[in-house]
Image (tube, coloured by chain):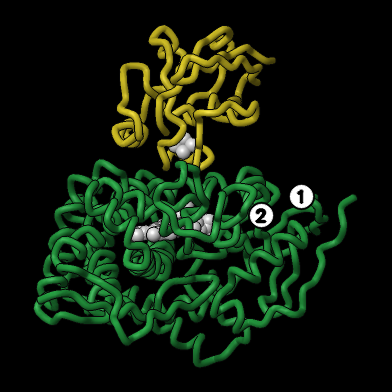
Chain colours: A yellow, B green
Amino acid sequence: MTVKLTFVAHDGGEHEVSADVGQSVMEAALSNGVEGITAECNGSAACATCHAIFDEALLVHMPEITEHENDMLDFAATERVAGSRLSCQIPVTDAFNGARIMLPEEQ
Amino acid sequence: MHSLVPTMDDIGFEELMNDPYPSFDRIRKEASAVWVSSARINLVTRFDDIMHIERNHADFASTNPGSLMNKIMGHSLMRKDDEEHQVERKAVETAFRPGVVKQYWAPRLEAISDRLIAGFEKDGETDLFNAFAAPMAAYGLTELLGFKSDVAWQDMCDWSQSLMDAVGNYTADPAIEARGHAAAASIATEIDRAMPEHRATENPSVLSSMAHAESLHSIDQIRANVNVIVGGGLNEPRDSILTTVMALLSNPDQLAQVRENRKLFAKAFEEAVRWVAPIGMYPRRVTRDVVLGDTQLKEGDQIGLCVGAANRDPSRFENAHAFDINRPRQGHLGFGAGPHFCAGTWVARQMVGEIAVPMLFDRLKNLRLHDSKPVTERGWVFRGPTSLPVQWDV
Ligand code: HEM
Ligand code: FES
């Protein structure tokens, strides 16, 4: 099962990818060569360089934020906003089909 | 076609110890994995190959039942994978979260740095290795772990070195092994001395985090993981303090820039860890016959990931051998990658890039390399300055 995701870079450039349900949003970005996700720790929730901003309507389809992720986001290179998450902690589900995911200026 | 792992016999061990970078360049050109006889392991030196390995830990495991590390330190989180690794990592992580680092550890680390500098700032010259970097890293680690504050910094350094020597004791020298076991025994005593207090009151230290972890830790788990942190959490901050200072003192233009804009100290630290990775190599075990880049690896092969080499891979970094705080921000491998990505990253950044190095430059006026005593550097598995003589105006 795959869904379509669109990553929107800080400068407005768009990159549509197809993502497998079950992989993380970070993995979907990396495996499709999306620029703007660095993911230095490859998904260990330890580096805060996979910061992405999600539409608030999607938040209910995501695992609840842990204290650890929350703390990491406070130290992301670009200041967090409502909808900010570590994309390595977000599994792609059916509900993500057609989602637009914003990338911050810096990772 | 994927060829078998080639062998290189003509790289001397002393050559690696003195300056591994020319050898790293040769190995990187040769193949994805190269058996280097003097190192007695297959070395992987290309950035993309190491990234591939870190993203496929089912094929390249950290678990390594026969390893010397397990024999000396016990079976720590560093040599575990998947679920088993994650529960123990969680217990360490809480102590080193960036928020905890900023609010709780930063003032404590500042006090240590301040006290150490006050001890020699009137002298006009010193060797920063023993006067500052080693005690800074050791006292810092004592606090982070939650050991009693009367532990001597020299003991911490000694235990750390003895553990590292024993883990690298491939010739099975019994004296080195005995010192490793003695260090582990001393550390076990320190854990026993400090633990009652941490069990009684929760606090951000590593020992407290382990005592109150969601998944109950056995005493063996606690000992093994504390051993790993003593063995591996001391020399890296020490060496990265020295490398950052050395690099800035050798590049006056960049030092001027950093003095003008203090935010750049953090960048200087990050670039120092890329330029001379304090952990230059760490091992993995191949779990099945698998292709890596242009070479065919076999199940059971031991491979050494040379992040020190990958951090100077010209396909990733322009002018890779130069220290340059102005290079475009580009992820490096100095803290590893993947599930074992350094748990101490944020505390190291704070300790070195925000506290220790800026405070040295603030307090020691016109700090400069010594006019007659040379800087020495050594190592390839672990690398950093072994002496950094400096002078300043008093
Ligand atoms: C500049 C300083 C440092 C550098 C460059 C560094 C580098 C690394 C690297 C490369 C690894 C990965 C090893 C592997 O994958 O086998 C690692 C792991 C680790 N580091 Fe650091 N380190 C630094 C400071 C620290 C400090 C200060 C601490 C703790 C006080 C620490 C605690 C750890 C722990 C616990 C692990 C194991 C994580 C795991 O297995 O999940 N490090 N470090
Ligand atoms: S990839 Fe490092 S926090 Fe997500």
Quarter of the picture containing the C terminus of chain B is bottom left
Instruction: Residue at 54%, 12% (x, y): give it.
Output: A96
Mark 2: amino acid: Arg
Q: Position of residue B335 (x, y in %)?
A: 47, 54
Check the image and name the residue furthest to the front: B253
- B33 left or right, relative to B270: right
Mark 1: amino acid: Gly
Instruction: Residue at 25%, 61% (x, y): give it.
Output: B357
Distance from label 2 to label 1 (Cα)?
A: 9 Å
In which quadrant of the rendered view does residue B223 lie? bottom left
The answer to whether residue B176 shows anywhere in this view is yes
Query: Given contact means CB atoms under 8 Å apart, are the residues at marks 2 and 1 in contact?
Result: yes
Q: Which mark, residue B46? A: 2
> Could you say whether the residue bearing mark 1 is in a helix, strand or loop?
loop
Q: Position of residue A20 (x, y in %)?
A: 65, 21
Instruction: Residue at 81%, 55% (x, y): give it.
Output: B295
Q: Position of residue A85 (x, y in %)?
A: 40, 25
- B385 left or right, relative to B352: right
Identify whether B318 is placed above or below B393.
above
- A31 left or right, relative to B376: right
Check the image and name the residue furthest to the bottom: B175
- Toward the viewer: B48 or B162? B48
Q: Are marks 2 and 1 on the same chain?
A: yes
Q: Position of residue A19 (x, y in %)?
A: 64, 19
In which quadrant of the rendered view does residue B181 lie? bottom left
What residue is pinned by disc 1? B293
> Could you say whether the residue bearing mark 2 is in a helix, strand or loop?
loop
Q: Tell whether circle 2 marks a residue whose Cβ is less than 8 angstroms from ligand 1.
A: no
